[in-house]
Image (cartoon, rainbow, N blue to C red):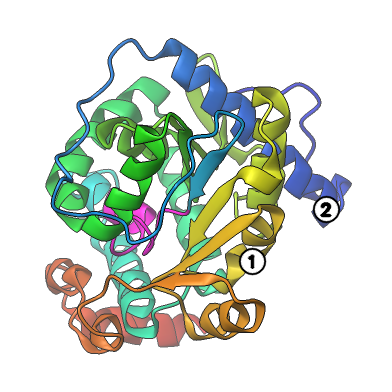
Amino acid sequence: MAALGWLTPRKRSATARSVLAGEAAAEAGLRSTQESQVTEPAPDTAAEVPDFPVAGDVRAAAFFDLDNTVMQGAAIFHLGRGLYKRKFFQRRELARFAWQQTWFRLAGVEDPGHMQDARESALSIVKGHRVSELMSIGEEVYDEYMADRIWPGTRALAQAHLDAGQQVWLVTAAPVETATIIARRLGLTGALGTVAESVDGVYTGRLVGEPLHGPAKAEAVRALAAAEGFDLDRCAAYSDSHNDIPMLSLVGHPYAINPDAKLRKHARKLDWRLRDYRTGRKAAKVGIPAAAGVGALAGGTAAAVALHRRRR
């Protein structure tokens, strides 16, 4: 996407970059819903009934974080696995993806340094490729790595909002193209994600603003609400990460889903609702991550850890 007035990060403050990223995400998300001609059937969630009601209010909407809220693991890492399989990059980069996914699963929280490193790697990998090519691959990657990692409980919450006649949006730092595919596959309204700049349908290797993370997510929700006429006090937001407290604080109905320790503490302090759909609170922290199997192709998870240490 080529954005008018796009400036390099050095020429904008962090706040201005967050606003730019949020507005770009809202614009891209709305455009993708207008361009979409086919809606995927919603999965059968009859067995998963939310244990709190969702009001049928057309001025309300629901905003869901993606990584570890709707889906186990991080979308960008699964995308990296798919791109490696298709020879987009070499084993050295795969080790980095494997290490970052291992950290995400073992720690149970997002590490900004790892996430930024992963995004920079992804941008360098897709530079010069066509947007349509990545969209096509994204469809395949969803089937290969993501479809079986959707949390049924969170999916049921999203469906409850849809059944009430409300819009439901993913809000994620993942590329907007990947997020849009996931939203469509789940039957959701649309997605707000990180917007990579493209010219004539080809990625330039730069972002519009900054990754849709932390405050930028709140700016995206704010921009979408203004465009769609939502009353944020009537809206709901769901996330697992304390990094999303700005987005959660923006709405009248915040929910902590599979929360990390900081978000759990914050949610309890403010009496926010909490839901944990993991089989055990420690399971995601001590279990062997799926990415470790992929890491074995590059010499195992130990090699990924060693690589990380050498880079520090």
| Predominant secondary structure, magenta span | loop
Relative placement, left or right, of 249 versus 275 is right
Q: How many marks?
A: 2
Residue 74: mark? none
Q: Residues within 10 Å of mark 2 (few under 14, many from 20)?
A: few
Residue under numbered circle 2: 15
Q: Position of residue 290 (x, y in %)?
A: 17, 69
Q: Amino acid at mark 2?
A: Thr
Q: Earlier in the sequence, mark 1 or mark 2?
A: 2
Q: Position of residue 53 (x, y in %)?
A: 41, 52
| Residue stretch in magenta | 65-80
When the figure is inspected, residue 274 is found, relative to residue 265, above or below; the finding is: above
Q: Residue at x 33, y 58 (%)?
A: 77
Residue under numbered circle 1: 245
**Is label 1 in a helix, a strand or a loop?**
helix
When the figure is inspected, residue 133 is found, relative to residue 265, above or below; the finding is: above
Residue 130 visible here: no
Q: Amino acid at mark 1?
A: Ile
Magenta region includes residue 137:
no
Q: Position of residue 225 (x, y in %)?
A: 67, 34
